[in-house]
Image: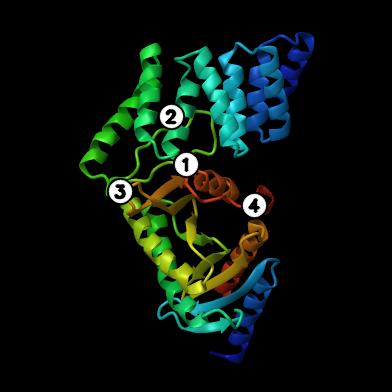
Amino acid sequence: MPDDIRRLSAELARDPSSLAILTLGEQLRRSGRSDQARAIADDARRRHPGNAGAHALVARIALDRGDRAAASAAWTEAARLAPAHPDAARGLAWLTLQDGHPEQARAILQRACAAGDDAGLRAAFDRLDARLVADAAAPLTAPSPRVEPPESTAPAVEVPDTATSGALEALARDAHAFVAAVGIGQWEAAIVEGECGLTGVAPQPTSIGRSAHRTAVAAPIPLGRFRRAFLSTVPGAEPPPASAVGGP
Amino acid sequence: MTVTLQHRLRTTLREVAATRGVFGALLADAGDGIIVASSLDVGLDAEAIAALAAALFTRARTASAAAAHGDALVLHVHAEYGWVCVTGHGTLVLVVVADRRAASGPVRAAMLRARSALADL
């Protein structure tokens, strides 16, 4: 990857208008050089304001940094420029779903599917649609619908299967009692760090006032990253400041 | 429990509790939740915490296994005014209560070191 970055940087130096700037930004992002990635993405957006990919890159980097508002704005602009842009549609749908608006998320995917012909987007729409039908039958027992975040957006927290959700529900009940015994206010999340992955559960009030829980699983990624991603999906739960997050 | 073992448990506990941002720590029997050693502040109900921690960590192990993530290493419970880490090995469960703003890296590292120490006991 460093070779790719060097090659792309050289290409960009030769031709500042090259679209290699988008690949370079993504490579920097994937290599964890967030500040440089953001600078390149901002530059890409200035140089190519009509390119949806430039806005999508800005959105992915913003989401990595926990700036959901900036990610949403950039994906919205990408979708305006290219209504069938898969990354923009998935990104907006994912954010909308995490905000607790599955019907709106479905509408976003449906519009993008109608505007283009992307198999991955169609599969995401079908999955969400099927999940919403199931939720309508059992609104408080079925797990939340799943829409994958845009392909290259990390970290990917996913909705666990039924067995894991059940185990996490039991953990949530005990966590609630435990935190009350310790006397540190309301519990916000419980995250299990396993040998080869992470699982999390957090309280989530519903629109009809009954308590439910949001759950997530992820492959082994840094704990702090998982925590930020997971807590950012829980309404009312503020992730700790980045400076307080260490992780492995 | 021998004096040597008690000493080693207390040493393990002291090392974790000395980590920046940690309010206190306790060791409990994983089976019955009875306190083995504690450095928790006086204001905290150590007995209740010990009793609940053992059951809580069992829940965490079940969830981790259900997700095919192997055994649970550490459980992190975040709350409004603090966060709690629980780990366990063999017949012991270790609980750490920390400031919400404490850096998780050092606390987590201390927990994992303590977990290894428990395994060696």
- Residue A184: assigned label: none
Count of numbered badges drawn on the protein: 4
Secondary element at tag 1: loop
Of B11 and A139, the residue lying toward us: A139
Please name the residue that numbered disc 2 is placed on: A93
Please name the residue that numbered disc 1 is placed on: A157
Q: CA distance from mark 2 to mark 3?
A: 23 Å
> Label 4 crowding class (10 Å Cα cut-off): few <14, some 14-19, many 20+?
many
**What amino acid type is highlighted by mark number 1?**
Val
Do tag 2 and tag 3 residues touch (Cβ < 8 Å)?
A: no
Q: Is residue A94 above or below residue B89?
A: above
- Residue A162: assigned label: 3
Q: Residue A15 vs residue A208: left or right? A: right
Question: Residue visible at 57% across and 22% down?
Answer: A56
Q: Are marks 4 and 1 on the same chain?
A: yes
Q: CA distance from mark 1 to mark 3?
A: 16 Å
Q: Are marks 2 and 1 on the same chain?
A: yes
Please name the residue that numbered disc 4 is placed on: A245
**What amino acid type is highlighted by mark number 2?**
Ala
Q: Earlier in the sequence, mark 3 or mark 4?
A: 3
